[in-house]
Image (cartoon, grey):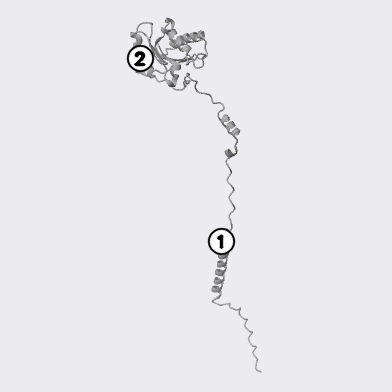
Amino acid sequence: MSQHRKPPPPKKKEEAFHNNPFKSAIKGIQEQEKKEKEAQARAEEEARKQKAPRPAAAPARKSKAAHESPEDEASLFFSAMDGVAQITHRGEPPKSNPRLPELVDENAEALAELSELVAGGPGEFDITEVGEHIEGLGPGVDRNLLRALRRGDFSIQGQLDLHGMTQLEARAALERFLSDSRRARRRCVLVVHGRGLHSKQQLPVLKELLKTWLAQKRINAAVLAFCTARPQEGGTGALYLLLRR
């Protein structure tokens, strides 16, 4: 009895394009298209941002000073000037700065010492007046010493201001000042007498008194020479006194 063979089982149908060689190429093309679309979308977004109108700049603030009234400006000025003091008055020299070193001209000092040695004792001054300028030289004192004093070769080592004093007060203050200065071995001092601009007769009363006092033995015994100060140190409102030691 012949045996009937069973027909072989049907083969499973392979998935479509399982071994399709174009599958990977198609997938690559799709991804490339996707990237191009994304790039295009970004470019369009940037273009829209650039075309959008920028916000208007805030208007510049007007200067505060433009709105300030004259009263406000005056208040600001006086506020800035608060505590500022006038440096000098007419006929009054500026106060020396104590922190600055005293500059001593050695040649002028040597001349003063020599003049003091060879000069005679106190006596009548040889006084010269030209306008408001005045100078005097003791007997036997080298005239070059007066030139050095006039040039400002000697540093100012002391100062006396006679403003506002009565005649008696000024005389006593001058004698005391000269005595103290000689004791301290000062060579050159400044005496401020003023120009008399605030006096009733507009006359330099103290200046005239100084000439009288310098002619008197008690005071001229301390002085070798004197002259009107330079403008920066009082000018015609002050005198340099060169002292004996």
- C-alpha gap between disc 1 and disc 2: 92 Å
On the question of residue 245 being in view, the answer is no
Q: Give percent across and percent down for residue 18.
A: 58, 77
- Residue type beneath disc 2: Leu
State the image coordinates of residue 19 (x, y, percent, origin top left): 56, 77
Tell me which numbered mark, 1 or 2, is placed earlier along the sequence: 1
Kindly identify which numbered label has been placed on residue 185.
Answer: none
* In the image: residue 141, left or right of residue 206: left
Q: Say which residue appears at 50% left-offset and 9% top-offset.
A: 167
Q: Is mark 2 on a helix, strand or loop?
A: helix
Q: Nearer the viewer, residue 62 or 129?
A: 129
Residue 64: x and y in percent read 59, 39
> Which quarter of the picture shows residue 141?
top left
Q: In this view, does 17 lie above or below 243?
A: below
Can residue 74 be seen?
A: yes
Answer above or below: position of 70 versus 85.
below
Mark 1 residue crowding within 10 angstroms, few (<14) / some (14–19) / many (20+): few
* In-front residue for pair 110/75: 75
Q: Which mark is residue 47?
A: 1
Q: Mark 2 points at which residue?
A: 145
**Comparing marks 1 and 2, which lies closer to the viewer?**
2
Secondary structure under tag 1 reads: helix
